[in-house]
Image (cartoon, helix red, strand yellow):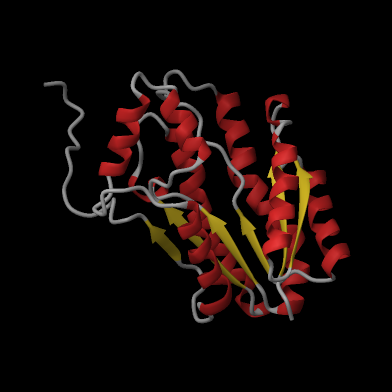
């Protein structure tokens, strides 16, 4: 049976409206390249009813769901705990964590029918921490924990639940955050130097890891696949004490 893919465009503000055309263009590209077919569906992942509609539309299109990849989220500009409001924290929890829970909840009845699997995209910082990003780190750490708990719950239905924790991966969001610093080029170079491999990962490498978990890693459930280029290994300069 040929693979079918349904992917979602996260929309959280009017500023993102131009990305709808980009989503349709990506759909056309995937359908041209094959194999299988692809359908782009616009969805605000901060809203429960839209998440439910996304799952419903997918089943109406294809009749089943074999794999759910939860990859919606945002990294706010770095900000200290003192400067972060409770509302900002709640909004980030809703987008980065609760959206994963809801998408999984609505997809699970169909995944159980196919003995499918869920892949949650977390982050390396959910394990090792990150400066001036406590709410973001909290959401990513919670994704890892939720993955393990859900793997336990769903084992009786033969549904595997795993997650991927990327390190520095060059994405539009990474470039956006770098652009907000004094020297974007230097910031990106620092990001590259954080890996033993001397470069950032790519979106394609994350995709390959997801395909591995979805199709080949049939004896893996509840794991956190660290995709970091070795960023967490060896010693680094960690002291926050001013010199």
Residue 238 seen in this snapshot: yes
- Residue 195 lies left or right of residue 227; in this view the side is left
As drawn, 119 above or below 10? below
As drawn, 56 above or below 158? above
Q: Position of residue 195 (x, y in %)?
A: 28, 49
- Residue 205 lies left or right of residue 26; in this view the side is left
Identify which residue is drawn at 73% across, 31% down.
17
User: Which residue ends up furthest to the front in the rendered image?
Assistant: 32
Identify which residue is drawn at 29% across, 36% down.
189
Residue 46 seen in this snapshot: no
Q: Quadrant of residue 38?
A: bottom right
Q: Decide which of 130, 66 is in the foreground and name it.
A: 66
Identify which residue is drawn at 45% across, 29% down.
177
Q: Decide which of 159, 218 is in the foreground and name it.
A: 218
As drawn, 23 above or below 17? below
As drawn, 205 above or below 198? below
Report the label total.
Answer: 0
- Residue 172 lies left or right of residue 57; in this view the side is left
Q: Position of residue 144 (x, y in %)?
A: 48, 56
Q: Quadrant of the N terminus?
A: bottom right
Q: Decide which of 133, 145 is in the foreground and name it.
A: 133
Q: Quadrant of the C terminus?
A: top left
Identify which residue is drawn at 64% across, 51% down.
100
User: Which residue ends up furthest to the right in the rendered image?
Assistant: 60
Q: Position of residue 19 (x, y in %)?
A: 69, 36
Q: Quadrant of residue 58?
A: bottom right
Q: Quadrant of residue 29?
A: bottom right
């Amino acid at each position: 049976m040929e693979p079918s893919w349904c992917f979602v465009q996260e929309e959280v503000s009017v500023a993102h409206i131009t990305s709808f055309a980009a989503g349709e263009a990506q759909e056309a590209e995937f359908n041209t390249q094959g194999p299988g077919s692809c359908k782009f569906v616009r969805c605000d992942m901060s809203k429960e009813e839209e998440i439910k509609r996304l799952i419903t539309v997918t089943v109406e299109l294809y009749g089943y769901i074999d794999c759910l990849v939860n990859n919606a989220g945002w990294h706010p500009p770095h900000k200290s705990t003192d400067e972060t409001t409770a509302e900002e924290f709640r909004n980030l929890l809703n987008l980065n964590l609760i959206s994963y829970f809801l998408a999984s909840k609505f997809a699970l009845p169909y995944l159980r029918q196919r003995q499918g699997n869920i892949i949650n995209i977390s982050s390396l910082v959910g394990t090792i921490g990150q400066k001036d990003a406590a709410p973001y780190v909290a959401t990513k750490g919670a994704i890892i924990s939720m993955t393990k708990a859900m793997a336990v719950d769903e084992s009786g239905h033969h549904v595997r639940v795993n997650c991927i924790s990327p390190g520095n991966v060059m994405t539009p969001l990474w470039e956006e955050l770098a652009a907000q610093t004094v020297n974007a080029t230097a910031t990106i170079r620092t990001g590259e130097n954080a890996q033993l491999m001397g470069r950032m990962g790519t979106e394609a490498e994350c995709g390959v890891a997801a395909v591995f978990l979805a199709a080949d890693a049939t004896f893996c459930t509840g794991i956190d696949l660290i995709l970091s280029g070795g960023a967490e290994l060896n010693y680094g300069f960690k002291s926050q004490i001013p010199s």
